[in-house]
Every structure is written in C-alpha cells, then in structure tokens.
Amino acid sequence: MEAMERPCIHVSLLADTDPSLYRWVEIGAEEEGVPTRQVSCETGDLVSLAYQAAQSSRLNIGVGISAQAVALHEQHMPARQPVLVFNYSENAPFLCRMMGANAARMVVHRPLHIEVDFPPPAVNFRPVAPVLEQNVEKKLPPAELEFEPVQLAQIIATVVRKLQERGL
C-alpha cells in the first residue's frame, strides 16, 4: 500500500527558472505554517502551470514560478483565471516569499497580501546611543531628543509592516 502524501501546497517551476525561487515560496508558506512541495507539471505557460499544481495538491492550492512572474491558483477557479499574479519588476525573492505566504493564507483562511510593498532600502542610521548618552549628560528631557525624520519614518514603516504580517 502506497503512503498518502501529506497535504501541502504544490509549487512548479517553468523551464529556465532560477530554482532558488522555489525556496522563497517555501519560506513564505512556512512562515504561515503550511508546507510546500515542488512538483513537476506539464510544460505550458505560467497560469496553466499554477493551475496544474493546484489540481495535484490535496489542499487545492498551487503556485507557478517563471523567470518573469509568480502565480497563485486554486483548483476551483477557471483554468485561465489565477487568484493572483506578481510580475517581477524587481526583487523576485521577496515577491516569491509573499506569494508563498498568500498561498498558505488561502489554506488557513486569512486575508491575502495584495499590495506589493517592497521593504525599504537599507539606510545608514545615525547611532541613537550616543545621542541618548549626550542628552543624559546635558540632562535634557526626553521630548528634546532629536531623530532624523527619515529614521523615524522607517522605524514606523517597519513596525506597521510587521504588525500587518501578523494580521494585527
């Protein structure tokens, strides 16, 4: 008797696609608590690849990855109508991770990440500790501590993004 495959999201790659992009989809899904498995599907375009992956998954969810885009499909959707497609203009690993999270969110019935909000670019922050030490020596009240507006905006954006990722 053949062992039954554990339920997981099926992910398939088109030919000439960077295989590391699968790992990013896997990471995104794992962050939401749902496993993935890379499968081979008949060749075709990206949307049909994602649809075939969904058809073969016990969870009815499939992801197709190409060198230009990543697509999410659900078994009950029309074959030519994917749930979501992200075209890579930049940052393909980030988009694949986000699509993996979206695939898992479909399984656990959570809202999808629809808008692509790339993480802010790394900026050299001015060290905060010397500013605090300096102000303590001068005995300035906390309201007079100065932060760069860019620093403050990036901190707030990071906190908001983390809260949204956790569904809060």
Image: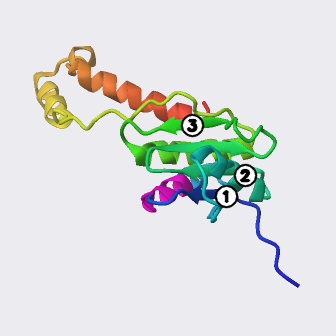
Task: Mark 2 or mark 3: name the one nearer the start of the chain.
Answer: 2
Query: Where is residue 153, by image quadrant?
Result: top left
Q: CA distance from mark 2 to mark 3?
A: 14 Å
Dot 1: element:
strand
- Where is residue 114? Give x, y as percent: 57, 29
Q: Which residue is mark 3?
A: 85
Residue at the image position 49 percent from the left and 50 percent from the top:
66
Judged left or right of residue 27, residue 52 is right
Query: Where is residue 112, by image quadrant?
Result: top right
Q: CA distance from mark 1 to mark 2?
A: 6 Å
The three-letter code of the residue at mark 2 reads Ala
Q: Are marks 1 and 2 in contact (CB under 8 Å)?
A: yes
The magenta segment is 17-27
Q: Which residue is mark 1?
A: 10
Q: 113 and 150: which one is in front?
A: 113
Q: Which residue is mark 2?
A: 54
Residue 23 is one of the magenta-drawn residues = yes
Q: Main secondary structure of the magenta part?
A: helix
